[in-house]
Amino acid sequence: MSLSLFFPPPPLLLLLLLHLSFILLSSSVCFGQAGNGGAKLNVKFYEQSCPKVEEIVRKGMAEAVSQNPRWAASILRLHFHDCFVKGCDGSVLLDSSGSFLSEKRSNSNRDSARGFEIIDKIKAAVEKACPNTVSCADILALAARDGTVLRGGPNWVVPLGRRDSISASLSGSNNDIPQPNNTLSTIITKFKRQGLNVVDVVALSGNYVIGVEPVTSEDLRLYNQTGNGLPDITLDQTYAANLRTACPRSGGDQTIFSLDFTTPATFDNQYFKNLIANKGLLSSDEVLFTGSNVTMELVTKFAESNDQFFVQYSKSIVKMGNISPLVGSHGEIRKICRRVNH
C-alpha cells in the first residue's frame, strides 16, 4: 500500500509540486523531426548562445515594415516558399553558384520573390551580436512571424535550431510550390507531400490577406474560361469588370494586385469573406470555397471568426516551419545568407 495514503501532501505543497512539474514540462518542449542524433527544434535553442536574437530580428522587421508595409507579406512568402522546397533550410535565399541554380529563378519566385535585402540586413545585425551562431533559416522564420504581428496578425512561438542548406533546388521550386492556376486537388496534394493537411491548406492560404501578386489574366479567370470570352461564372461580375480594366486581354500581364482588396494593410480574416462573396483574386483562391464541401466549411468558419482563424493559422504555420529542418551537424550556419560558407 502506498505511503501517500497515510501521508497526503498538504494542499500548498501539492500545488507547488504541480507547478514545478508544469515548469519542467514546458522547458523541455521540442518540435519537429529529428535530423541528426535525435536533435529537434526547440523554442529555447538560442537562450544561452544568442539570447537577444528575437529582439534583433523584431527590431529589423519593425524598421523594414515602417518603411514599406509590403515587406511583411514578402518575408512571409519567402518563408512559405523556403519550407516547401527541401524543407525550411534557407535555400530560397541562396544566389546561383557554380554547383546549383538559385530558387530565385523559378516560376514561383522569378517575378515576385522580394525581401532578400531585409534578411541580409537582419542577418548582419545578428552576426554582429552572435557570430556564426544563428541560421538564416531561423532568422527567416522569426522575421515571418514578426512581420505578421506588425500587420495585426497572430503571434506564435517559433521553434528554433534549423541549420542552413548548402544547395538549392530550382526544380523543386518549380514543381512543389502551389501555383495560382492549380486545381484544388493539386494544391492539396502539394501540401500533403509536406505533411500538411486540408485544414492547413485553408488556414495558410490566409497568408494572402496582406499580400500583393503580379498576375496574368489567366490567373484571374478573366478571359475565355467560359468559351465565350467572359469571366468565370464563379467570379463576382462587378469585381471582374474592375479587374478587366486593370488587366486587359493583352498587355496587362504581371499587373500588381492586392490579394485582399478590402483590408490590404491588415492581417485578418477578410480574405475568407471575399471568397464567400466570389471575390477571390486568383483561381487557386476561389477553389477553396467552390472546390469541396470540406474546404467550403473551413472558409466559412474562418470568415465567421477572426479568432478561430488566428488560432488555426498559428498552429498551421508552426507545423509548416517544422518541415524537414536540418539540425545537429547537417547543413551549416551561413555567414551570409546569399551564399554558402565554402
Image (cartoon, grey):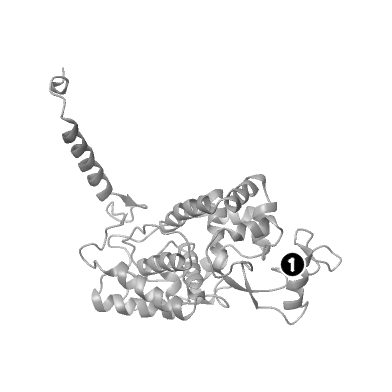
Residue name at image x 68 percent, y 58 percent: 286
Q: Inspect the image, locate mark 1, and give the three-letter code of the amino acid beneath it.
A: Tyr
Label 1 CA crowd tier, 10 Å (few <14, some 14–19, many 20+): some
Query: Which element type, helix, strand or loop, lies under badge 1?
Result: helix
Residue name at image x 56 percent, y 56 percent: 190
Lateral position of residue 284 relative to residue 127, left or right: right
Q: Is residue 342 visible?
A: no
Quadrant of the rendered structure where residue 176 is? bottom right
| Residue farthest along the top direction in this orientation | 1
Residue 287's x, y, as percent?
67, 56
User: Which residue position holds label 1?
Assistant: 239
Residue name at image x 35 percent, y 52 percent: 31
**Image quadrant in which the C terminus is located:** bottom left
Quadrant of the rendered structure where residue 314 is? bottom left
Lateral position of residue 117 relative to residue 56, left or right: right
Q: In this rendering, is residue 340 above or below 323? A: below
Lateral position of residue 217 relative to residue 157, left or right: right
